[in-house]
Image (spheres, grey):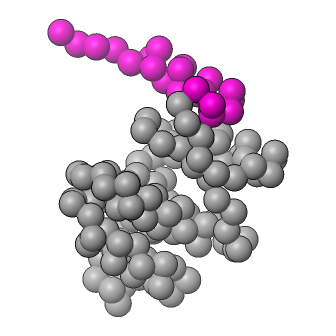
Amino acid sequence: MILSLSKRVETNLPIQAEAEAINLATRVAVNRGFANVVVESDVKSCIEALNAPTDAVPWRISSISADTLSWACRGQQFVFKWSPRDANKAAHVLASWCLGKNVFGCFGQGYAPRPFLDVINSELLNVVIAV
């Protein structure tokens, strides 16, 4: 994990909130000069929108998706991948904590909320290294 952050968005639709999160991640990666970026989301329709022809994108996220792709073209290489929700637990824990505490912004290593770090640490403990 290089960077974790949260941002309040003006929508109550989960698909738009996720599209905004993907857009934010893409912008941050480009602005920080990251290369070979993989953006994962558990909202399949958002990922499909970024990998599909423009006319196939749901209208509720079409402008957000177009902006995301515009930003991605400025970066080195972006891949947008779907991942199952259970593989995205840390992001959901962070979002829930931030919403509950009304906290938004960047969290440096060692300064992230304890529930978020607990998920990260438990996932590290479950990693099996094959030799």
| Residue 14 sits inside the magenta stretch | no
| Residue 114 sits inside the magenta stretch | yes
Vertical placement of residue 28 versus 45, above or below: above
Name, please, the residue furthest toward the bottom. Answer: 55
Q: Quadrant of residue 130?
A: top left
Vertical placement of residue 113 versus 61, above or below: above
Closer to the camera in the image, 25 or 88: 25
Q: Residue at 40%, 73% (x, y): give it.
A: 68
Percent position (x, y) of residue 84? Answer: 45, 46
Work out whether residue 15 can be spotted.
no
Q: Is residue 20 left or right of residue 68?
A: right
Q: Is residue 13 left or right of residue 54?
A: right
Percent position (x, y) of residue 88? Answer: 51, 42
Magenta segment:
110-131
Percent position (x, y) of residue 34? Answer: 30, 52
Vertical placement of residue 32 versus 19, above or below: above
Q: Residue at 65%, 40% (x, y): give it.
A: 93
Percent position (x, y) of residue 14? Answer: 63, 66
Q: Residue at 54%, 20% (x, y): give it.
A: 122
Q: Residue at 80%, 51% (x, y): give it.
A: 102
